[in-house]
Image: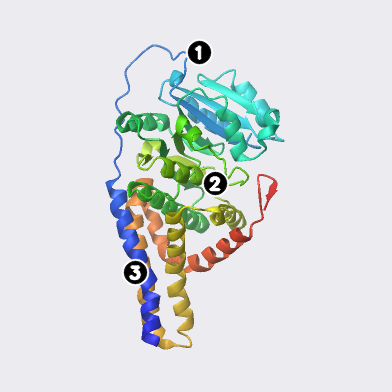
Amino acid sequence: MSSAWGLLLLAFPALYAGQMMRLRRAWQQLPAPELLPLPVSSEPVATPEPTVAPRFSVLVAARNEAANLPRLLADLSRQLLPADQFEVIITDDHSTDDTAALLAAAAQTTAFRLQMVRLAETAEVGMGKKAALQAALQHARASWIVCTDADCRVGPDWLRAYAALLDVTGPDVHFVSGPVLLTGPSTLLQGLSGLEFAGLVGTGAAGIAAGTPTMCNGANLAYRRTAFAAVAGYAGNAHLPSGDDEFLLHKLHAAFPGSIQFLKHTAALVRTAGPPTLAALLRQRVRWASKWRHYRHLPSQRLAVLVLLANLAPMAGLVASVWQPALLPGAAAGLSLKLAADCWFLAPVLGFLGRRRWLAYVPLLQLAYAPYALLVGLAGLRGGYEWKGRRAG
């Protein structure tokens, strides 16, 4: 009987390892678009005419982001994509700080077209991130919508990388997911949370490459405006504070199979500060987990269950081996297999993100992940959290 339990403890890590091998192959096969050299010109960049539709409309939802927006606006002003090819629309979601005044002043000086939308003026659409993005979308003029967050940083070739990918993909692509990196001080918490987040980014990218998209991040994504309208946008989940990214991903994949791409280029990398404290990290992860019970996407559900069982099984076996020593070999083998699979998958992902040193944190994250994932998952299923000064659930 003990040997049968030992094999069972090994089964879930073995299935997980097989999945990680498939995902690593998919990650390695992701193409990277080529950025063409910039034309040499001495002509100053002109402010775009309001009657000419740009190539991209960049949408940002902002609530009390006066401290962060100047950095994002500075990054956008340094875009090497010509200023007449993009516009930026930022929705002020009932901010109580200087967000509105800052945006009004910036709109007078930016080389690119910057428009502020007050969500209070469109109260019929509600409040929150989805409502803010929907309000901004009503003012967008481009056929492609690019989304990021007010507290993010983007490189000068961010939009050029999107343009390079779309130049070679054609009209059948409707959604593009971009890479995101957590940044912050070199602390243990930052290393562990950054490593976990890198795993999510890599898994999402590999799933897209394998034809089974499961996850993406709203800090860096783009979609075709007509496709958004075809699936009725956020309809069906607009009442949920979170999920402006993955629900849309799943809807577009269901409506247009094969239309999802991942932008695997370091120029497209968006950086955002990781949670500064353990309490902030847990609040963020509980918010993310709160949308899981609303998923109707089978591949996402299967992957979440497999990850949880692959972490719980060997750890449960190690605890139970105190009373049943015969379980120890199976539990140890399962733990080792899970650890090896994670390192094998994460190595190229962390290399792409420039954080290969985070591989040293994999064993520690392995030990902490089972209780962490279980508690966060249960808290997310229960609901109830605070975000941007609002209580949800």
| Rendered-image quadrant of the N terminus | bottom left
Query: Residue 230 in the image: x percent, y percent?
Result: 48, 34
Look at label 1 and name its amino acid: Thr
Q: Are marks 2 and 1 in contact (CB under 8 Å)?
A: no
Mark 2 = which residue? 243
- Residue 156 in view here: no
Residue at disc 3, secondary structure: helix
Residue located 39% across and 70% down the image: 12
Please name the residue shown 41% across and 56% down the image: 358
Q: Position of residue 197 (x, y in %)?
A: 46, 52
111 or 318: nearer the viewer: 318
Q: Which mark is residue 14?
A: 3
Q: Are marks 3 and 1 in contact (CB under 8 Å)?
A: no
Q: Residue at coordinates 49% horizontally, 65% vertically from top-left?
A: 369
Q: Secondary structure at mark 1?
A: loop
Q: Position of residue 153 (x, y in %)?
A: 49, 37
Give whichever of 218, 224 is nearer the camera: 224
> Dividing the picture into quarters, in which one does residue 101 lie?
top right
Q: Residues within 10 Å of mark 3 (few under 14, many from 20)?
A: some
Numbered badge on residue 51:
1
Residue 375 located left or right of residue 315? right
State which tag comes first along the sequence, 2 or 1: 1
Residue 177 lies, in percent from the top left, at 42, 41
Of all residues, the one furthest to the right in this rendering is: 96
Report how far apart the C-alphas of labels 3 and 2 lie in the structure.
Answer: 31 Å
